[in-house]
């Protein structure tokens, strides 16, 4: 398994999940601020704001940590992990980490208060930054999970 190829594959998955969220976010922002879709009197209730913010934080911050812990527990006794299992794990981790931008779209359309928007934005930035599948990170992950990187000879 070549770390460069794995990184390219995971980058494709990463951007296929992040770009629609960015497009939806721009559309939601334009509906709210340019076309004045929501008014100041039409805001989400406090309980809805708390639930959406908490769910965004749990899915974007806590769930990837728990999923990683579960995967480590599941493969702790194995000598080597299959490439497919590793790729599935990384894709799922990326999917979980990139869910908060979609919650940000919902929060913006529901006209939530600034505190909730800022928190969900921070969750989104954290997930997008920390779980970016760079080549060095993938190589490090492969070493942790006992996957031998195979480098192809240059031609």
Image: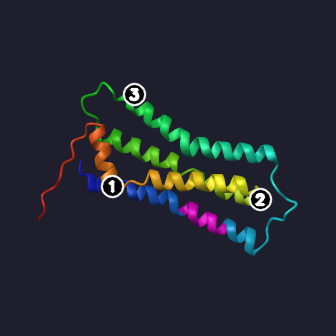
Query: Mark 2 or mark 3, which has the lower sequence index?
Result: 3
Q: Which mark is drawn over residue 111?
A: 2
- Is 125 drawn above or below residue 1 in the view shown? below
- Is 99 drawn above or below residue 74 in the view shown? below
Question: Residue 114 appears at what percent x and percent y?
Answer: 73, 58
- Please check the rendered image and state whether residue 22 is part of the magenta-colored stretch, yes or no: yes
107 with respect to 22 (left or right): right
* SS assignment at label 3: helix
Residue ID at (28%, 56%): 5
Pointer 3 residue? 73
Q: How did the renderer colour the structure?
A: rainbow
Question: Residue 154 appears at what percent x and percent y?
Answer: 13, 62
User: What is the residue that sits farthest to the right in this orientation?
Assistant: 41
37 with respect to 102 (left or right): right
- Magenta stretch? 20-27
Q: Quadrant of the C terminus?
A: bottom left
- Please check the rendered image and state whether residue 114 is part of the magenta-colored stretch, yes or no: no
Question: Residue 49 appears at what percent x and percent y?
Answer: 75, 48
All told, the count of numbered labels is 3
101 with respect to 64 (left or right): right
User: What is the residue that sits farthest to the top in this orientation?
Assistant: 77
Pointer 1 residue? 7
Picture quadrant of residue 110: bottom right
């Amino acid at each position: 398994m070549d770390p460069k190829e794995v990184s390219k594959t995971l980058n494709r998955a990463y951007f296929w999940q992040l770009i629609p969220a960015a497009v939806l976010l721009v559309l939601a922002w334009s509906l709210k601020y340019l076309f004045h879709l929501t008014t100041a009197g039409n805001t989400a209730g406090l309980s809805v704001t708390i639930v959406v913010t908490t769910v965004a934080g749990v899915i974007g911050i806590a769930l990837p940590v728990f999923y990683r812990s579960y995967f480590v527990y599941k493969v702790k006794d194995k000598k080597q992990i299959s490439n497919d299992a590793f790729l599935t794990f990384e894709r799922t981790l990326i999917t979980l980490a990139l869910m908060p931008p979609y919650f940000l779209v919902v929060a913006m359309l529901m006209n939530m208060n600034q505190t909730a928007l800022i928190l969900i934005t921070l969750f989104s930035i954290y997930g997008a930054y920390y779980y970016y599948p760079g080549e060095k990170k993938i190589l490090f992950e492969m070493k942790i999970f006992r996957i031998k990187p195979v480098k192809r000879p240059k031609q």
